[in-house]
Image: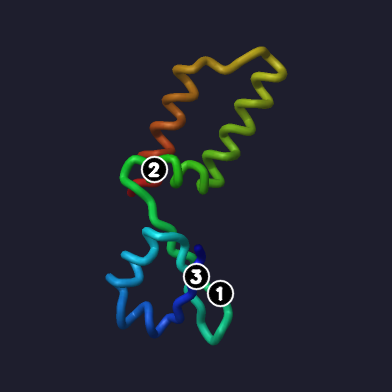
Amino acid sequence: MVQFVNVRELKDHLSEVIRRSHGGDVVVTSRGKPKAVLHSVSEEDLEDYLLANSPKFLRMLETSYREYRRKGGVPLKRLLAQTERELARLRR
């Protein structure tokens, strides 16, 4: 279930709103217009979330897929190394 909260309520009750996000997304509004979404994420899912929302990583996957189609594959070792570098960059 999606919930809505305005910026002032978020500022005044941040801890409570974060707890509410565990039950579903919370849309943050300003002057009645959506500005952000709070989405609960577990520690285990954080890497997946960061990678899925990284334009650089998505481009890297697309490049790898094109190379796979053209040459028959990309060495797993190379893809894993690129992934580790991208994760390290995202964590900074």
- Crowding around mark 2 (Cα neighbors within 10 Å: few <14, some 14 to 19, many 20+) is few
Q: Earlier in the sequence, mark 3 or mark 2?
A: 3
> Which three-letter amino acid code belongs to the residue tagged 2?
Asp
Q: CA distance from mark 2 to mark 1?
A: 25 Å
Q: Which residue is mark 1?
A: 34
Please tell me whether mark 1 sits on a helix, a strand or a loop.
strand
Q: Are marks 2 and 1 in contact (CB under 8 Å)?
A: no
> Which three-letter amino acid code belongs to the residue tagged 1?
Pro
Q: Earlier in the sequence, mark 1 or mark 3?
A: 3
Q: Earlier in the sequence, mark 2 or mark 1?
A: 1
Residue 73 vertical position relative to residue 89 in the rendered view, above or below: above
> Which three-letter amino acid code belongs to the residue tagged 3?
Val
Please tell me whether mark 3 sits on a helix, a strand or a loop.
strand
Residue 7, label in figure: none
- Crowding around mark 3 (Cα neighbors within 10 Å: few <14, some 14 to 19, many 20+) is some
Looking at the picture, the colour scheme in use is rainbow
Residue 11 vertical position relative to residue 44 in the rendered view, above or below: below
Please tell me whether mark 2 sits on a helix, a strand or a loop.
helix
In front of the other: 46 or 23 = 23
- Crowding around mark 1 (Cα neighbors within 10 Å: few <14, some 14 to 19, many 20+) is some
Q: Which residue corresponds to the image point at 33% horizontal and 49% vertical from the top-left?
A: 92
Q: Which residue corresponds to the image point at 45% horizontal and 81% vertical from the top-left?
A: 6
Q: Which residue corresponds to the image point at 43% horizontal and 64% vertical from the top-left?
A: 38
- Outermost residue toward the left in this view: 15
Query: Residue 72 at what x, y percent from top left?
Result: 66, 13
Q: Which residue is mark 2?
A: 45
Q: Which residue is mark 3?
A: 27
Q: CA distance from mark 3 to mark 2?
A: 20 Å
Q: Are marks 3 and 2 in contact (CB under 8 Å)?
A: no
